[in-house]
Image (cartoon, rainbow, N blue to C red):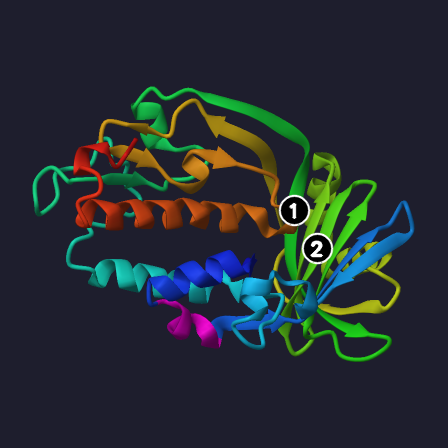
Amino acid sequence: SRAYALTHSSRLLLERLGLWRALEPCLCPFDQLHLSDVSAGGGLCFGPEDLPPAVRGEGSQPVGWIVRHQGLMALLLARLQQHARIDARLGESPATAAPGPWGNPDLVLAADGPGSPTRQALSIGLWQRGYRQSCLTAQVLLRGADGPLDGAAWELLRPEGPFAVLPLGDGLVQVVWSAPQGRCRQLESLGDAAFLDALAGALPDRFQPDALRDQPRAFPVALQWAHRLHRGNTVLVGESGHRCHPVGGQGLNLCWRDVAVLHDLAKTVISGGISLDSLPG
């Protein structure tokens, strides 16, 4: 039940891959991004006028979009299965999977997450630093003291960690609550009423939580960087190669920057600019 914040770099990639229009029904755009430092008592609000000139020149654009995990993954997995030249191995490590329909593949993309079995099988080392925090996510129905909540996202910098409020439409939001690991475990174990009481104390004064719509879930966060991003014809993509704190929606959008770079390189191979063997490097 997670949701993600998408930036314009991700929108441009999805348009290039012919996915954006199909994804639009799953998107919740927001025209304001409120950034607030709770300890300092100050903040900023970013709007469409703060977008880069190249983006503003494309016409009316929101600051960003929120997309739900289920709708996004349904589209991506369906397109992968339909593509004639992609052998999608879900739940398998490319390092140990049986040969595909074309024998040895030209390129293996290992997008198997921060614990990447592929990275381990290839003996690629990892530099990492665990944060003394976890992130807790929950979907909550809110009401606002001064009008509708839709169309705005919030990032609060609180003493215990960043706290995001992502709009999903009709007053429903996803909360991404960073806090010490013990605090997240305690929040995860609370009943609905006790969790909403705790949430009310963390939210800005203008928000009031009405109902919890899913079970809060906490996950650990860490900074990770693989010692190298490829070996042979295998390339580590996304969190198999790098991982950061999810503050500001950086995780997914940075992973998709990997895809954009690989797409550009693949086009260069097709045009004869570089050889296929040099693509992973």
Q: List x then y, in percent, for residue 120.
A: 35, 24
- Which residue is rendered at x = 66% and y = 69% of the image? 48
Q: Secondary structure at mark 1?
A: helix
Farthest right residue?
Answer: 41
218 lies above or below 125: below
- Relative side of 259 to 44, left or right: left
Q: How many marks?
A: 2
Q: Main secondary structure of the magenta part?
A: helix
Q: Are marks 2 and 1 in contact (CB under 8 Å)?
A: yes
Q: List x then y, in percent, for residue 95.
A: 24, 31
Q: List x then y, in percent, for residue 10.
A: 47, 58
- Which residue is rendered at x = 69% and y = 68% of the image? 49
**Which residue corresponds to mark 2?**
164
- Residue type (three-letter) at the residue carrying disc 1: Val
- Residue type (three-letter) at the residue carrying disc 2: Ala
- Relative side of 124 to 221, left or right: left
Cα–Cα gap, marks 2 and 1: 8 Å
**Magenta span of residues:** 19-25
**Which residue corresponds to mark 1?**
247
Q: Is residue 24 magenta?
A: yes
277 lies above or below 265: above
Q: List x then y, in percent, for residue 251.
A: 54, 46
- Which residue is rendered at x = 54% and y = 24% of the image? 128
Which of the two labelled residues, at mark 2 and mark 1, occupies the earlier sequence position?
2
